[in-house]
Image (cartoon, coloured by chain):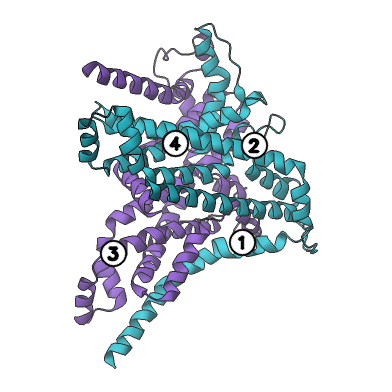
Amino acid sequence: MKSKRMFVFIAVSIAALIFLFPLYVALLMALKSAKQTFESFYALPPSLDLANFVHAWDTSKFPTAFLNSVIVTTISVALILIVSALSGYAIARGNKPLYSFFFLLFLSGMMVPFQVTMLPLYQLGKSLGLLNNHWGMMLIYGGFGVQSGVLFFTGFVRGISREIEEAARIDGCSTPGIFVRIIMPLLKPVTATVLVLNALYIWNDFLLPLLYLQKKEYRTIPLQQYFFFGQYSSDLNLAFAYAVMGLIPIIIFFLFMQRFIVKGIAAGAIKG
Amino acid sequence: MVNLRRTIRREMWYILFLVPGVLLFTFAVIVPFATGIRYSFTNWDGISRKLTYIGWDNYVNALQDPDLWTVLGNTFKYAIMLTLLVNAISLLFALLLDSYLPLRNLFRTIFFLPSVISVVLAGFIWSYNYSQGFPRLLSYLGLDMTSPLGNPDHALIGLVIIAVWQGVGAPMIIYIAGLQGIPSELTESARIDGAGPFRVFRSVTLPLLAPSVTINMLLVLTGSLKVFDLVLVTTNGGPGFATEVIATFIYKNAFNSYKAGYGMALSLIFFVILVIVTVVQVSIFRKREVEM
C-alpha cells in the first residue's frame, strides 16, 4: 500500500514537472543572453543578470501597458460588481414574472458567441467615439460580466432569509437602505467569486483590445505583448523578458486570491 | 392602504436597481446582436455607408462554401479532441489529488497555474518550446522533432496540446469539488463489499460525479468551439488551411476581406450551431444522470 502511494506521488510529480517545463524554458530565456542560450540551452545562467528585463522595460512601455490593464480591469470589475449586485438583488426579491423574464434574458445572453457581436460592437464603438479609449471597453466588459454576475448574485440573495429585511422594513428602512446596510455586508463571499473570475478574464483578454485599441498608449498587456513579440521576433531573449514581466502580476494575483478562485470556480459549476 | 403604497414603493426601487444591468446588457449584447442579424442580410463591405439588402443570399452562399465545411471540420476536430483530453486528464488529476497525497495543494497550484496566463503568452511560450525547447530535450534521447505547428498534419494537435496545458485547471477544481461532495461511506462500503478501486470508481464515484461531468463537458466543448486567440497568435489558421477555425474564419471575412455581411451570416450560423450543440449535449447528459 505504501509503495503504491509512493508510485502515485512520483507520477504526479512528473506530471507537474511537465506542466512547469514550458515556463522554465521561458524563464531561462528571459535570464540569459543570446550567446549564453546558444552555448548551453538548458543551463541556468552563470549569474543572475536582469539586463533583458531592464532593456525590455525601457523599450516596451511596460508601465503604460500595466497601468492600462489595471485601469480597465479595476473599473470594469467594479462596474460588474455594483450592477450585478443591484440587478441580482432586484431579481431575487422582486418575485414577479417581469424579473424572471430578465433573469432568462441575462442567461440566454451567455449563449451568444463574441464573434456574432464583434463587428457590430466595432461599428457601435466607432460611431459613438469609443474606439481608442478605455470607456467603451469598460461598458462592454460590464455588459458581458453582468450576465453571469446576475446569476451568482440572484442565487446568493435567494439563500438569504427575508426575515431580517422585513424587520428592518418595519423599523422604517427603505429598499436602498436595506440593500446597503443589510444585504451588501452579506454579499462578501459571492462578491469575491464574481471579482476573481471577471478580473482574470478581463486582465487576460486579447480580443476586445485588439478590436478597440489601435493607439499604442492605450494598449493593455496582452495586446502589447502580441505586438512586442512580432516586433522583437529576432531578439527572443528580450521578448521573453517582456513575457515574464507580463506574467508576474497575474501570478501574484493568483497566489493571493487562490482560495477565492478555487471557491469561485466550484461555486460557478454548481450555479451554472 | 399603507401596505399597498409600501409595496409600490418597494417595487419601484427594484425596477430602478435593474435598470443599469439591463442598459449595459442591451449595449453590449442585444443591440450588437440585432444589428448583426441585420448586416447578415446585406452585402455590406464593412466600410461604406450604404447597406444593400440581398435577402438570404449570404446564408445560401455560406452553406455552399466548401471553406466553411473545412473550417467547421477543423473546429469540431479540435473541440472534440480537447473536450475528451481535458476531461480525462483533469478527472485523473482530481482523483489523485483528492486522495491523501503529500504536497497536494502545491500540485493543484501547479496544474492550475497555466490557466491564469493570457492565451497570447501561452501561445508565444509554446511556439518557442515546440521549435527549440522540446527538440533539444528530445535530441538527448536521440529523437528528432520539428514543431508540429509548421506541419499541416500535426498543427491542430499541436494547438490541442497547448489548450490542454492551459485548460485542465478549472475542470480539475470542479471535479475535486464534485468528489468532495460524495459521501465517503458510499465508497467505503463498496470497498468492504469487495470492490476493487477501478470497480468503485466505475460503479460508485463516476455516477455520483455525473453533474460535474455534464458541466465540464459543456464548458470545455462550447469554449473550445469558440477558440480564437490561440489560433490567431500561434498559426493564424495555417499552415495552409490546417488550423483555420470558425472564429478566425469569421474574423478574417468580416475584417480582412471586406465581406462584413457574409461574415455576419457565418457568425449567425455559428451561433445556431452552438445553441444546437448545447441543447443536445445538456439533454443527453441530463438524461444519463437520471438513469444512473
Same-chain status of marks 2 and 3: no
**Which secondary structure, mark 4?**
helix
Ranked by sequence position, the earlier of labels 1 and 4 is: 1
Q: What amino acid does circle 3 point to? A: Met
**Which secondary structure, mark 1?**
helix
Residue B117 horizontal/vertical position (percent): 45, 36
Q: Which mark is drawn over residue B32?
A: 1
Q: Which mark is drawn over residue A184?
A: 3
**Mark 2 nearby-residue class (10 Å; few <14, some 14–19, many ≥20):** some
Which-is-in-front pick, marks 3 and 4?
4
Q: CA distance from mark 2 to mark 1?
A: 27 Å
**Taking the image as drawn, is residue A128 in sight?**
no
Rendered colour, chain B = cyan
Ranked by sequence position, the earlier of labels 2 and 1 is: 1
Q: Which mark is drawn over residue B87?
A: 4
Quarter of the image where one finds residue B105:
top left
- Which residue is painted at 27% across and 41% down in the image? B180
In the image, B270 versus A259, the foreground residue is: B270
**What is the residue that sits farthest to the front in this orientation?**
B193
Subunit of label 4 = B
Subunit of label 3 = A
Please give the residue where the numbered disc 2 appears in the rendered image: B74
Do the numbered discs 4 and 2 sit on residues whose CB atoms are within 8 Å?
no
- Which residue is painted at 32% across and 56% down in the image? A190
Q: CA distance from mark 1 to mark 4?
A: 34 Å
How many numbered callouts?
A: 4
Subunit of label 1 = B
Which-is-in-front pick, marks 2 and 3?
2
Q: CA distance from mark 3 to mark 1?
A: 32 Å
Do the numbered discs 3 and 1 sit on residues whose CB atoms are within 8 Å?
no
Q: What amino acid does circle 4 point to? A: Asn
